[in-house]
């Protein structure tokens, strides 16, 4: 049986840098949820930090010589295991019930 190589690994091995979709698509999700729940002002800062997140992903991928997508998944998994970082707005509540973690 032939082992399949993930597309992100093929791009990485060819030296092609790309932005993981789960990171770049976060802006649309944050904007949509924030607007719907009435957090438009709070979400602007979150969206602006996506570039910083990509930079951290690229640096870690370069240091570890692994695809950026692999790093992005590991970072997302780590965030889910420990919960939301302090100071981030939880968009899962209405404005009057919003909670800062």
Image (tube, rainbow, N blue to C red):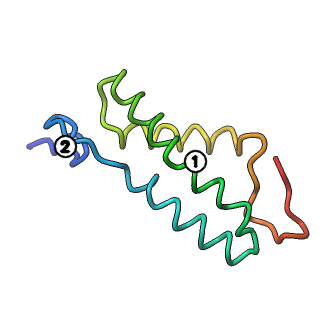
Can you name the residue that lies furthest to the bottom here? 36
Write the residue at 17% across / 42% down. Answer: 10
Give the left or right position of residue 39, taking residue 53 as reference.
right
Q: Name the residue under label 1.
A: 49
Rendered location of residue 34, percent (x, y): 68, 69
Q: State the residue at coordinates (16%, 45%).
A: 4
Q: Which of 87 and 9 is in front in this view?
A: 87
Rendering quarter of residue 33: bottom right
**On screen, residue 39 above or below 70:** below
Q: In this view, does 57 lie to the left or right of 52?
A: left
Using a 10 Å C-alpha cutoff, classify the residue at mark 1 as few (fewer than 14 neighbours), some (14 to 19) or many (20 or more).
Answer: few
Q: Which residue lies furthest to the left in this view?
A: 2
Comparing labels 2 and 1, the label whose residue is closer to the camera: 1
Q: Is mark 1 on a helix, strand or loop?
A: loop
**Which callout, 2 or 1, points at the residue further toward the start of the chain?**
2
Is 34 on the left-hand or right-hand side of 60? right
Quick check: marks 2 and 1 in contact, CB under 8 Å? no
User: Which image quarter is the N terminus in?
Assistant: top left
Q: Residues within 10 Å of mark 2 (few under 14, many from 20)?
A: some
Q: Mark 2 points at which residue?
A: 11
- Quarter assignment of residue 68: top left
Q: Position of residue 50 (x, y in %)?
A: 52, 49
Mark 2–mark 1 Cα distance, whole angstroms, equals: 25 Å
Residue 96 is left or right of residue 69, and the answer is right
């Amino acid at each position: 049986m032939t082992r399949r190589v993930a597309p992100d690994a093929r791009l990485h091995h060819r030296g092609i840098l790309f932005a993981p979709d789960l990171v770049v698509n976060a802006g649309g999700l944050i904007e949509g949820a924030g607007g719907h729940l009435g957090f438009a002002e709070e979400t602007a800062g979150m969206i602006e930090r996506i570039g910083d997140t990509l930079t951290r992903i690229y640096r870690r991928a370069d240091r570890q010589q692994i695809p950026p997508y692999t790093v992005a998944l590991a970072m997302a998994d780590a965030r889910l295991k420990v919960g939301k970082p302090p100071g981030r707005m939880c968009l899962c509540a209405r404005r009057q019930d919003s909670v800062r973690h």
